Image (tube, rainbow, N blue to C red):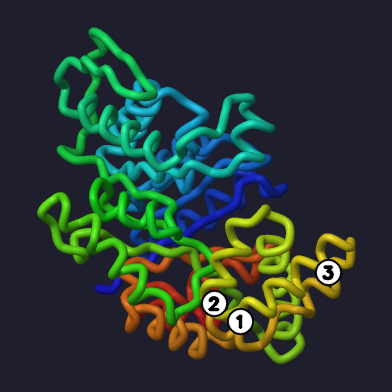
Amino acid sequence: MEQIGLFLNVSRETSDEDLITLAKQADDLGYHSFWTGESWGRDAFTILTMVACHTENLRLGTGIVTTYSRTPALIAQTVASLDILSKGRAILGLGSSGKVVVEGWHGVPFDSPVSRTKEYIEIIRKAFSGNRVEHQGEFYKMERFRMISLPVQKKVPIYMASLGPKNLELTGENADGCLPIWVNRERFPEIREQISIGAAKSGRKASDVTIAPYIFCYTSDGPNDMAHGEQLLRAHLAYYVGGMGTFYFNSVSRAGFNAEAKAIKNAWESGNREQAARSVSDRMLDSIVVLGEPQKCRDQISEFRKVGVDLPIINFPHGTDLITMGRTISALAPKEDSLIQASV
C-alpha cells in the first residue's frame, strides 16, 4: 500500500476536538503518519502526545522542531518519552529554521546550521543507544549523560527539513528521511541525486532515505470552491516566497520561477499582498500544489510519486475549513474504501 502522511498546523485556532477528529479520520483510513511543527502556536510534543492518546497506528512526527530550541539531550529524552507513550510510533523531524526565528524568538545565535545539525543528530543517536554520552564537539561538550528510559523502537527515524545542497547531502549521510516544502515536481530527481552524494559517504543508497515533502492540497467541491482553494494556495505560496526571508525565494528561483519569485517579493515588500498572490503563475501552481476535484487530486499525488516522492505529506493552505480538510483526507487516503467516503 502506498504511504501518505498528514500535517496539521496547530498555530491556528483549531480546537483539540477538531484536531483529534481529523487525526482519527486519518488513522482509520490508513495514513502513515501525523505531523505537526512549531511556529506561533503550541509546541509539537504536547500535540503529538494528545494525538497518540486518541489513535492506534498513526506514526507521530515533529515537522519540525529546530535544533536551536532544545539541547540534544533534552530532545532525545522527549522523543523517547513520546515513543514509549505511543508504543513505538515517534518520528523526529529536525531543522535549523532561520535567523529570524532562532535569534528573534529563541535569543540564541544562528551559527553554522549544517555543522550543528550534524553534531546534534550524532549526540541523539548516541543517547538512543543507551550508552553513556561522552561528547566533546564543536558545539556541545557533554559528560556522563545516559538515558535510563530508552525508546521502544530500536532506531527512531530522524528526518531533516532540507532543500539546499549542503542540507540534502547531510540528510543522505545521517538521516532517515527528507522533509522539503514548496518543491515543484520537476526538482525531485535532483533532490534524490543530492541525497545520494551524502548517502554514499555512509555506505548507503539514496533509496535508504525517505523523501517526504509537504504538499499543499485542496480537494474542491465544485467550480466555485475550486476558485476559492486556488486563491488560498496562491496567497499561502506568496507568503512563503515573499515574506519568509530569502530561503524559499531562492529555492523557487532555482526551480525555474525566478521572474515569478521577484514579482512576488517586490509586491510583498511594497505591502500589496493581493498582487503578490496574483504573481504566483499558473505554471508554479500546477507544478507545486495539488488542487481540484478528488480524482484529479489523486492523479496529481501519483505524479509526485512518479518523480521520486516516497511519502507525500498533505498540508492545507491557511484558511482551509474543516469540511475541506476532511474531504481532502478522505480523497487522498491509501485505503480503497476512502474512494467511497470521498464522494459522500
- Give the quadrant of residue 337: bottom left
In-image side of 253 versus 300 (left or right):
right
The amino acid type of the residue labelled 3 equals Ala
What is the distance, in whole Å, between disc 1 and disc 3 at their CAs? Answer: 17 Å
The amino acid type of the residue labelled 2 equals Ile
- The reply to whether residue 148 is visible in this rendering is no
Q: Name the residue under label 3.
A: 267
Q: Name the residue under label 1.
A: 284
* N-terminal-most mark, 1 or 3: 3
Depth check, front residue: 192 or 344: 192
Depth check, front residue: 255 or 90: 255
Res 288 label: 2
173 up-or-down from 112: above or below: below
- Give SS at disc 3: helix
Q: Crowding at label 3, few (<14), some or many (≥20) Cα neighbours within 10 Å?
A: many
Depth check, front residue: 8 or 95: 95
* N-terminal-most mark, 3 or 2: 3
What is the distance, in whole Å, between disc 3 and disc 2 at their CAs? Answer: 21 Å
**Residue in the image at 66% along x and 61% along y:** 240
The residue at the far top in this view is: 144
